[in-house]
Amino acid sequence: NLEQKVEVIGNDELTNLAHAFNMMSTKLFQVDQQRKEFVANVSHELRTPLSAIKLLSESLMYEEKTAVETYREFLKDIVLEVNRLDKIIESLLALVDIDKGKLELNYEITYVNYLLEKLIHSLKPIAEQKKISIDFICSEKIQIELDRIKIQQALTNIIHNAIKYTPEGGKVDILLYSENDSVTIKVKDNGIGIPKESLPHIFERFYRVDKARARSTGGTGLGLSISKQIIELHQGEIEVTSEVDRGTVFYVRLPKNISIRS
Ligand code: ADP
């Protein structure tokens, strides 16, 4: 048991030490609990697609005279589950990378406009499949220092979600504007929205509002936790407001100056 406590008596240096020890002990205990929970979640998330693959392939194996179409259908499902496993592992590696590279952001002076234009362009084909229009509005060129690859990853997750959780024919508006000390990227969709009780949890690892729906959209529940960590590594912040059946708005705020960051 990690949570060792010592009795606190009096009000001298020893007592302060005892207090410090107890606080450290509680923190260690919490970290250990989180680690255990994370390992349990990872195992569960990996096992779900694996079980499906097992079931699908075994039923093909033991079925006599399977029609070619059935084969194809089952194989298609197997490929879907394999892709899912691949995505989970990719996200897990991204998390490991973030944890490892906490102090190693590769800051480069970047036009946020161009970065956004580029990543919107790469998401356009997915949006077009659902006839979702993406509008990007920005009235000025905004240049700040950031880690391009990481911020691109963070924003892609958010904009991809806006597309994923918006029904056909919907709309995603992206706004970039500058305030005194910060730059804000606002991503607004008119999609399914997030229930109030789920809002505090959406940045947690593996949290999904609707597991069944997330599975069909290929969600892993890791995207937003990765985005949040990346944004916070940049000393920025992320906020969300949402209304069920009306839509969701994400605000990403990044500081403009290095002096603000340090
Ligand atoms: P996922 O891979 O499941 O999309 P995320 O970590 O990116 O995982 O998001 C966590 C959950 O938050 C999603 O499963 C979804 O329920 C909810 N969510 C995120 N973005 C939106 C959005 N724009 N509209 C509605 N729900 C969203």
Image (spheres, helix red, strand yellow):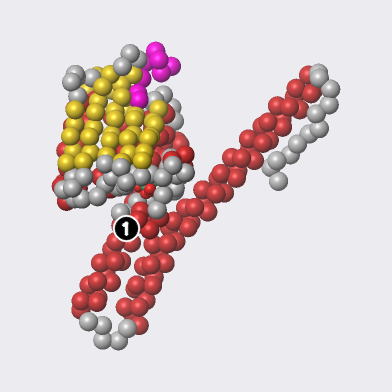
Q: Could you say where residue 252 lies in the image, as x and y percent from the top left? A: 34, 29
Q: In which quarter of the image is ligand 1?
A: top left
Disc 1 residue type (three-letter):
Ser
Q: Is residue 254 magenta?
A: yes
Q: Is residue 51 left or right of residue 159?
A: right
Q: Quadrant of the C terminus?
A: top left
Residue drawn where x is 42% and y is 62% of the image: 48
Q: Give the range drawn in magenta.
A: 253-262
Q: Return the residue nearer the eye: 108 or 20.
A: 20
Instruction: Identify the residue at the far right of this view.
Output: 10
Q: Return the residue nearer the eye: 99 or 114.
A: 114
The quadrant in which residue 230 appears is: top left
Q: In this view, does 192 lie to the left or right of 40?
A: left
Residue drawn where x is 18% and y is 45% of the image: 132
Residue annotated with mark 1:
216
Q: Is residue 182 above or below residue 90?
A: above
Q: Is residue 41 magenta?
A: no
Q: Could you say where residue 7 lies in the image, as x and y percent from the top left? A: 81, 32
Residue drawn where x is 75% and y is 36% of the image: 5
